[in-house]
Amino acid sequence: MLPGARNDGHGITPRLQRGARARDLIYAKGRTADHAIILCQGTALRFNRLSDGRRKIHSVLLSGDPISPSMFFERSLPFSVEALTDCRFSVFDHAELRPVLESSPDLVLSLLQAFRDEENDAREHALDLALRTAQERVSHIMLGLMERVKLRHVIRDGRYPFPLRQQDIADFAGLSVAHVNRVIADLRKAKIVEISQGVLTVFNPESLRAIGEIQ
Amino acid sequence: MLPGARNDGHGITPRLQRGARARDLIYAKGRTADHAIILCQGTALRFNRLSDGRRKIHSVLLSGDPISPSMFFERSLPFSVEALTDCRFSVFDHAELRPVLESSPDLVLSLLQAFRDEENDAREHALDLALRTAQERVSHIMLGLMERVKLRHVIRDGRYPFPLRQQDIADFAGLSVAHVNRVIADLRKAKIVEISQGVLTVFNPESLRAIGEIQ
DNA sequence: CGCAGATTTGACAGCCATCAAGGTACGTGG
DNA sequence: CCACGTACCTTGATGGCTGTCAAATCTGCG
């Protein structure tokens, strides 16, 4: 199925299909936008940047993810979104969305559920940041992304597409690049995982889960 | 207005009014519950506990706050809730809630907005944990609570009701009690704030904001 | 080839955790 | 009235995890 021919299963046709190159800004924090955006292809990052240049990545977006559930009824968001790889995404106008939402209770329900998932994610992430070590956080990030990538790709030989650079992992896990590098080096030396050319190879998933699995 | 006489402004009457003593568990993580709970009086904590006993506080609930927006349409939550002070709360049955929600679009909208606020809160909190120092986090927690308490109480002489113990602040900020104590001691020595008997006295709000205000 | 971006590594420092001990306030019971 | 227990706050000593800074290496690409 071509991206241009897709809809969301609710009979809504996107007004626009658009693309972005890796590192392009898809949405700038606070910018007014009367539309919702859903990622169709590629990987993107939700993040905030502080005045001193430090960055916090809130989540990684994969194909099928909306930029944010809020964007279905809000005109601006409190974070930015940037393409990590080349992306394609669909744009849905608020004007066209509103009547559909108002007449479709189950669409509203999936919106509520999307919000619930986002909130649970954010809470779990905060728990990680507060209580887990660097090793645990990095492993947990890998495991979380692996789970989601599995739903979209056939995985062979434990090789997962993994487009995050070490700087991205650092900004996600609240660590310095140097330390993320050391953590990954340790995982590599222990023959648990290896990252190379945007591919995460998992040699020992049990050990990885033992370190990064929550609860 | 008596708590028992309150409703939420949408014409829904709570099925039950209930109370809890300080330190009582109001809701246990994962427990099935076919109702939503709204705090009417007192202060409560949303938290998770790890198997090793460590605790992460996700947020502080004040009067008027729902235990969680999810609870309006989910049967269980992924965290527990405990009374910090003596509390009163209202219980709304799902069975009675559902038809009201389905027939009232603006109620659903406020639910969506509540979710948006929760998510933004959680994200901002994660950013704090990832990028801020202990001083900044503790000050930020104080400022956030002060803002919300201002909406509910008349504040005189910079004296805010503040029921969190140092252990609670630690579990909220992802710090050890010992270090929270040192941070608070520094703030006291700098004549910025003082905590005593559940009252936070702010001597120098400008300095506090200079440390803990975000952006 | 040469450049830019990313990864890797080492030396060093600092923030904060851990552990331990003591202090204070307050209620309870003898 | 005092002894005692409990909960919470306070403080010091020590160490470790992780940040900072800097430089070298690697990689892809024009």
Image: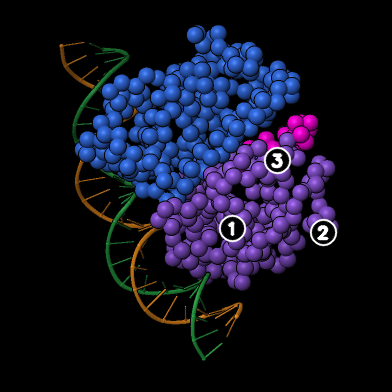
Chain colours: A purple, B blue, C green, D orange
Q: Are marks 1 and 2 on the same chain?
A: yes
In percent of width and height, residue B15 lies at 63, 13
Going from the N terminus, do you reach mark 1 or mark 2 first? 2
Q: Nearer the viewer, mark 1 or mark 3?
A: 3
> For the residues marked 1 and 3, what is the alpha-carbon distance in whole angstroms?
21 Å
- Classify mark 2: helix, strand or loop: loop
Residue A156: quadrant of the picture? bottom right
Q: Residue at x 67, y 25 (%)?
A: B106
Taking B122 as reference, is B42 above or below it? above
Q: Are marks 2 and 3 on the same chain?
A: yes
Task: State the residue position of label 1.
Answer: A25
Q: Residue at x 50, y 8 (%)?
A: B2
Going by the numbered disc 2, the residue's amino acid type is Leu
Chain assignment, label 1:
A
Q: Mark on residue A2?
A: 2
Q: Residue at x 54, y 14 (%)?
A: B18
Residue B97: in magenta span: no
Q: Write down the region rendered in magenta.
A: A99-118
Task: State the residue position of label 3.
Answer: A94
Residue A114: in magenta span: yes
Going from the N terminus, do you reach mark 1 or mark 3 first? 1
Going by the numbered disc 3, the residue's amino acid type is His
Going from the N terminus, do you reach mark 2 or mark 3 first? 2
> How many numbered discs?
3
- Classify mark 1: helix, strand or loop: strand
Q: Is residue C22 left or right of residue A58?
A: left
In percent of width and height, residue B31 lies at 62, 29
Chain assignment, label 2:
A
Taking C2 as reference, is A190 above or below it? above
Q: Are marks 1 and 3 on the same chain?
A: yes
In percent of width and height, residue B207 lies at 28, 39
